[in-house]
Amino acid sequence: MSIWRRRADPAEMEARFQSSLPGLFGIRIIEVGADFIRAEMPVDNRHVQPFGILHGGASVVLAETIGSIASTLTLPDDRRAVGLEINANHIAPVPSGQVVSATCRALHIGRTTQVWQTEIHRADGRLACVSRLTTAVVERRE
């Protein structure tokens, strides 16, 4: 059974953020399952720190992007999700030239808050980062 209350089309999601930070970072929505979203991001000169490995902030952009999308997809049209807090633990370095994959799942879907966990994996499958995003559910204002 799906947790989504809104249409979950990866191409539509990507089109919405094409001219913003997720689009500039090359984030692609790969799959929307019944209770998860999977995305990919290349690791190139846009994403690395001076030592040539994935910058922790780029991992957070990826996690917040798919966590925010996931949170929004669970809400009725008169509500929206806004970020309250995000954290990330960086487990293993990712060298430039790889593509990371990220999978986001809900830890808590409440009436006023939600908590989403994203695991980011290197190309060899090793866990590179785990992040937790808390969102507030608020009334949508035009």
Image: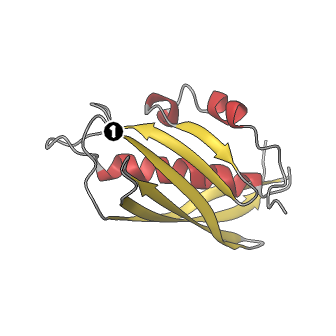
The residue under the point 69% across, 30% down is 11
Q: Is residue 64 left or right of residue 111?
A: left
Q: Quadrant of the N terminus?
A: bottom right
- Mark 1 secondary-structure assignment: loop
Depth order, front residue of 115/44: 44
Instruction: Determine the image quadrant of residue 103.
Output: bottom right
Please determine whether, in this image, residue 75 is positioned above or below residue 61. Answer: below
Indicate the colouring scheme.
Answer: secondary structure
Q: In this view, does 134 lie to the left or right of 140?
A: left
Q: In this view, does 91 lie to the left or right of 103?
A: left
Q: Where is residue 128 in the image (x, y as percent from the top left)?
A: 35, 58
Q: Position of residue 112 (x, y in %)?
A: 73, 71
Q: Where is residue 16 in the image (x, y as percent from the top left)?
A: 66, 31
Q: Position of residue 107 (x, y in %)?
A: 63, 73
The residue under the point 66% across, 57% down is 36
Depth order, front residue of 77/103: 103
Please determine whether, in this image, residue 131 is positioned above or below residue 69. Answer: below
Q: Is residue 74 left or right of residue 71?
A: right
Kindly give the residue lying farthest to the front in the view shown: 124
Q: Please state which amino acid type lies under the numbered disc 1.
A: Gln
The residue under the point 40% across, 55% down is 125
Residue bearing mark 1: 98
Residues packed near mark 1 inside 10 Å, few (<14), some (14 to 19) or many (20 plus): some
Instruction: Determine the image quadrant of residue 74.
Output: bottom right
Q: Quadrant of the C terminus?
A: top right
